[in-house]
Amino acid sequence: MSSNVPVPVGDITAPTPQNTPLGHAPIASGLSRPTVPDISEDNEEEGAEPDLSGAARDAMMGLVQGRLSSLVGRSSGYIESLPTEVKLSIEALKGVQVKQNELQNKYKRECLELEKKYLELTKPLYERRHAIITGAAEPTPEEIEEGEKQSVKDDEDYTPLPKDAASGPAAIPEFWLTALRNHIGISELITDRDTGALKHLTDIRISYLDDSSSKPGFKIHFHFTPNEYFENDVLEKTYLYQEEVGYSGDFVYDRAIGTEIKWKEDKDLTKEFEIKKQRNKNTNRTRLVRKAKPTESFFNFFTPPLAPSEEAIEAGEIEEEELEEIEEKLEMDYQIGEDLKEKIIPRAVDYFTGKALEYDMDEDEDDFEDIDDDDEDEEDHFDV
């Protein structure tokens, strides 16, 4: 067989997104929609437009989703119908892709090492920031001058502070609590009951797992002063990556591990206590029983959700709604960890002042675009 001669494939139908069955994907990964025939062919032949308003639209959408889900992962028969010589070429392409994946994995590993390097260079600045926040050190004139230059750059109406103002160390009250509250996602986790404990939060740091760790990842450290709520001086949250990069070329989260909080008596903010009256069925005597039930709290962050096993999913042991709920919790948990690492820790002062909210809101707005009435009408017809 000559490898230089292209093999004709005749009139074989072109491939579709359903050609290759999907492998097992992470719980939070999404699937691209395959193209399917128009489900309203009969109506089109009669020249009638389907009425897709209200319940009819919901029913049609359900039918579309049902057909999409039934096609995903199914083979169209195209690959199987190709000559053996072409199949060998396809397998060879997969072999080339393996080499590409190996290079991408190496690249991301080196990027991680570069992040570690620059974190070490940043540590003295984090130490300086901590000293100013806690009032352990006095700001220098140079630091103040650079800060005011940045303020003028951000806001042309900024009024410089008086030069004869009293100087000296001045702690910034509730710095980290305020910074966390100015993050859209984290603010939703903080309850009124949590604020007393979070007022004792003095610093948030990041570290990367060393080479001795079985998997790459990073750790977030929350430092607290002694308080009435728990005995820990530091609460930690570790995020582990899978050893190989994912399909998108980036590290994929594997799981998260949180610190066990050593709550002081009756101070567990993740639980609510209630008094219930119980009656003895035999003696008819009553007694009061104090029971605890889980409640919303920022400190649930240190008890991360666990992804169900593939075996449990395949066996149908978990309902679809429950699976979706777990997926949402995992996605939120990982996103908050990433935002702490990439945004809040390196730009803490911007979150304290609220400046970061402008960029966060702009980022969210960029994900959406205006649509006119004509576009909306087209969407209503679900032409897929």
Image (tube, grey):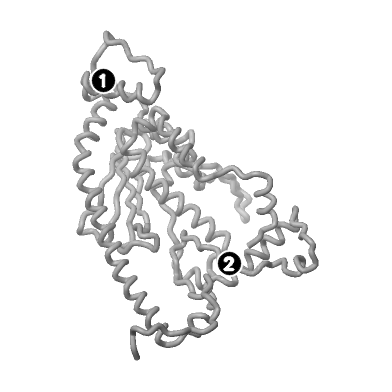
Which residue extends farthest front?
5
Q: How crowded is mark 2: few (under 14 residues within 10 Å), some or many (20 or more)?
A: few
Query: Residue at left 57%, top 64%?
Result: 319
- Badge 1 element: helix
Left or right for 117, reference 229:
left
Which residue is at the front of the view, 88 or 365? 88
At 34% from the left edge and 70% from the top edge, which residue is drawn?
Answer: 97
**Could you say where residue 266 lies in the image, as x and y percent from the top left?**
43, 39
Q: Position of residue 202 (x, y in %)?
A: 31, 33
- Most extreme residue toward the top is 164
The answer to whether residue 254 is visible is no
- Amino acid identity at mark 2: Thr
**Which of the two discs, 2 and 1, sits closer to the camera?**
2
Local SS, label 2: loop
Residue 17, horizontal then vertical, whole percent: 52, 70
The disc placed on residue 354 is none
Q: Looking at the image, which residue is at 32% across and 43% down?
A: 235
Instruction: Residue 35: give its label.
Output: 2
- In the rendered structure, the answer to whether residue 13 lies left or right of residue 265 reads right
Q: Which of 205 and 293 is in front in this view?
A: 205
Against 335, residue 153 (above or below) is above
Read off the residue under disc 1.
145
How far apart are labels 2 and 1 at the CA level? 59 Å
Looking at the figure, which quarter contains the C terminus? bottom right
Q: Do the residues labelled 2 and 1 touch (CB within 8 Å)?
A: no
> What amino acid is at disc 1?
Glu
Q: Residue 147 in the image: state x and y as whole percent.
A: 29, 24
Q: Which of marks 2 and 1 is nearer the N terminus?
A: 2
Q: Nearer the viewer, residue 331 or 257?
A: 331
- Is residue 271 among the parts visible in the rendering? yes
Which quadrant does the N terminus fall into? bottom left
